[in-house]
Every structure is written in structure tokens, then in C-alpha cells.
Image (cartoon, rainbow, N blue to C red):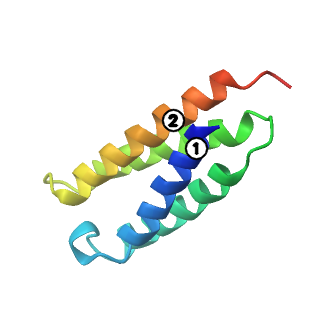
Amino acid sequence: MWQDWLNFLLGLWLVIAGFIPALNTGAAKMWDYLIVGVLVLIFGLWTAKQRWPEWLNVILAIWLIIAAFINWPPSTVMVNSIIVGALIAIFGLWAALMKPSS
């Protein structure tokens, strides 16, 4: 499904963003981006007719959004995490609801 490929690209963006100094506020955010990004990449490539990888992407997206508020005051890191997290959640939920139950 095309939503899986978009989540794959968003996961790739998170991995890249982990190495961009303006988009991470230190080692903790870098590792957060890298771990979540790699997992979203893996679950984005998982094209089986199962829903659980999509739901895991939704959970990871929720974590990304929650983790954005740990870095207060608002910054580009926060905006990036919220936008990417929201997109991953939308595409993951969309793909999960479109797949037949197995």
C-alpha cells in the first residue's frame, strides 16, 4: 500500500534528521530519532496483509509527538517531531484500517 511507502520515507527522514544538528537537541533526541526512524522504516517495508505493523507505527508516532513536548520551549525539533509523528500516525492508521483483518 502506498501509505507504507510514505511511512518508509518518513522513517528515513527521521534517521537523517538524527544527524542534523538543528533538528536534535543532543544525544537523547538523536537516539530517539534513530530508533523510531529505523523501526518505522522496518514496519513501513512490512507489506504483509497484517495490521500489527501499522498499529506499531501508530504507537511510535504517538511517542514521537509526546516526546516533542519534553523539549520545551518550542523549537524546530518540536515542530519536526509533531509534524512527522502526525503524518506517520495518519498513514499508519489509514493503512491499518484498509487492510482486511487476518
Q: Which residue is mark 2?
A: 91
Q: Where is 5 relative to 41, above or below?
A: above
Q: Residue at x 49, y 69 (%)?
A: 34
SS for callout 1: helix
The residue wearing badge 1 is: 57
- Along the viewing direction, whichever of 14 and 25 lies nearer the viewer: 14
Q: Nearer the viewer, residue 32 or 41?
A: 41
- Residue 82 image position (x, y, % from top left): 31, 45
Report the amino acid beneath label 1: Asn
Q: Secondary structure at mark 2?
A: helix
First of labels 2, 1 by sequence position = 1
Circles 2 and 1, Cβ within 8 Å, touching? The answer is: yes
Marks 2 and 1 sit apart, C-alpha to C-alpha, by 9 Å
Q: Image height check: is 97 above or below 73?
A: above
Quadrant for the C terminus, please.
top right
| Rendered residue at 66%/23% (across/down) | 98
Instruction: Answer left or right for 70 relative to 38.
Output: left
Which amino acid type is marked by label 2? Phe
- Say which residue appears at 25% left-offset and 77% top-offset: 21
| Image position, residue 15 (x, y; %) | 46, 68
Q: Residue furthest right?
A: 102
